[in-house]
Amino acid sequence: MQAIAEMTDEQLVGRAQAGDLEAFEALTTRHEQRVYSLALRMLRQQEDAEDVTQQTFLSALENLSGFRGEAGFSTWLLRIATHAALKVIRKRKGLDTVSLEASTEPQGEDGAIPHPDYIADWRESPEELAHRNDVRQLVEEALSQLDEKHRMVFLLRDVEGLSVKETAEALGLSEANTKVRLLRARLQLRERLTRTLGDPQTRITRSHNHS
Amino acid sequence: MLNEYVDGTVDPAVCEEFEKHMAGCNPCQIVVDNIRKTITLYKCGERYELPVSFRRKLHDTLRQRWKETH
């Protein structure tokens, strides 16, 4: 018999749907770090991240029979986690009945996209940088400094690899708005990281303006 | 457009002008390269481990609920 650890998510979901608790536990073990990390980065508060993680897997347990596999199992979980995280955010803001779009976006996304300022080649490859402790701290700090609405889009699209459409659906945003937020998040993170990771000798300082 | 360019999903027929600008604009090329590296850095980043006590509680809760519902 095939070992449970070697089974695909699809196989495990099939078994769990047929009543196999061991298969469901294996799915939980496989995806719990991803869900917890997403929740922690969205909410920046350990207790809230734990609540969201638990709610996500309880909801998955209860709704497993309704999972038809249109999206991958992990995408399904991340959507559930995102909805739970949005609830926490709304509660924090005391705006239980207002949508995220309205609560975070009173002025719209019409402002000009900031122009890149510090432009320089990075000294090292991201693959090398990713394992350095100081860089890990830098990337988490830069992420936590983003506005919530930009951070959530970046996390789902660029960190977790959802499509723009899936990201928009999970957050209840239009695709157009999702793209604008993604661009702002990417540019802001680029700016922050390049100031530290960029090679000053390659910095381009001449004015560079075009539409 | 910049998003699509970074992601490599731009339709070349639609954005000839943009491509032309990019080809001749070193700062833009570096910005795009910086953004791609930024994304890669986050993608390569490690995930957080669940606190041990929370993980135990999570799995206990799930087993309990499973038994109640199955």
Image (cartoon, coloured by chain):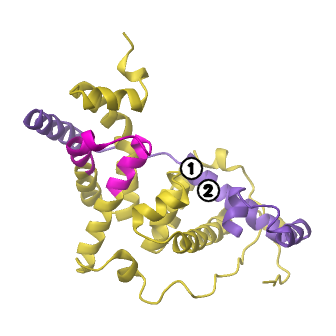
Chain colours: A yellow, B purple
Residue at 75%, 67% (x, y): give it. Answer: B31
Q: Which residue is mark 1?
A: B43
- Give the quadrant of the C terminus of chain B: top left
Tell whether A129 sits left or right of B18.
Answer: left
Kindly identify which chain the residue marked by label 1 belongs to: B
Tell whether A35 sits left or right of A195.
Answer: left
User: The magenta stretch spans which residues?
Assistant: A56-81
Co-location on one chain, circles 2 and 1: yes
Per the picture, the main secondary structure of the magenta-coloured stretch is helix
Distance of mark 2 from mark 1, alpha carbons? 6 Å
Label 2: element kind? helix
Q: Which residue is mark 2?
A: B39
Residue at 33%, 77% (x, y): give it. Answer: A99
Residue B25, x across and y down, in percent: 88, 71
Residue A18 lies in the magenta stretch: no
Residue A62 lies in the magenta stretch: yes
**Contact? badges 2 and 1 (CB < 8 Å):** yes
- The answer to whether residue A123 is above or below residue A87 is above
- Count of labels in the image: 2
A147 vs A87, nearest the viewer? A87
Residue at 81%, 68% (x, y): give it. Answer: B15
Residue A48, x across and y down, in percent: 26, 60
- Mark yes or no: residue B34 visible: no
Label 1: element kind? helix
Residue at 41%, 66% (x, y): give it. Answer: A171
- Mark yes or no: residue A95 visible: yes
